[in-house]
């Protein structure tokens, strides 16, 4: 991961997680999609009912957001 990628990740990940938590809270669900803060595409997510960890993956391009907590 380059320094630019790391800087981008530091900005986009908190936005993605905040959007996911807000969507999950408003719609009372553990799975869904939000707008990807990096590319504007569709960011799918799931939240573990066991420990609250969030898994997310942008459905648009490789190299966009994708993580597992």
Image (cartoon, rainbow, N blue to C red):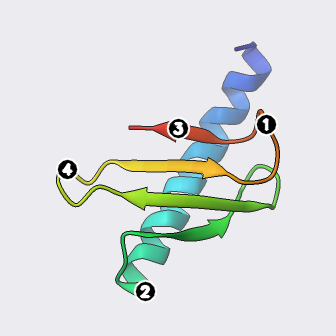
| Mark 4: few/some/many CA within 10 Å (<14, 14-19, 20+) | few
Residue in the foreground of this view, choosing between 18 and 69: 69
Q: Secondary structure at mark 3?
A: strand
Residue at image coords 19%, 50%: 51
Which residue position is annotated with label 1? 62
Residue 63 in the image, given as x and y percentages of width and height: 77, 33
Measure the C-alpha gap from mark 2 to mark 1: 28 Å
Q: Is residue 37 above or below residue 8?
A: below
**Mark 4 vs mark 3, CA separation in Å:** 16 Å
11 above or below 21? above
**Which residue is tagged 4?**
51
Quarter-of-image position of residue 3: top right
Where the N terminus falls, by quadrant?
A: top right
Query: Which residue is disc 3 drawn over?
Result: 67
Q: CA distance from mark 2 to mark 4?
A: 19 Å
Residue that label 2 marks: 27
């Amino acid at each position: 991961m380059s320094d630019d990628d790391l800087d981008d990740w530091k900005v986009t990940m908190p936005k993605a997680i905040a959007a996911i938590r807000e969507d999950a809270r408003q719609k009372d669900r553990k799975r869904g999609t939000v707008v990807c803060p990096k590319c504007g595409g569709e960011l799918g997510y799931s939240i573990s009912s066991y420990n609250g960890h969030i898994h997310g993956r942008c459905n648009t391009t490789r190299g966009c957001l994708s993580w597992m907590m």
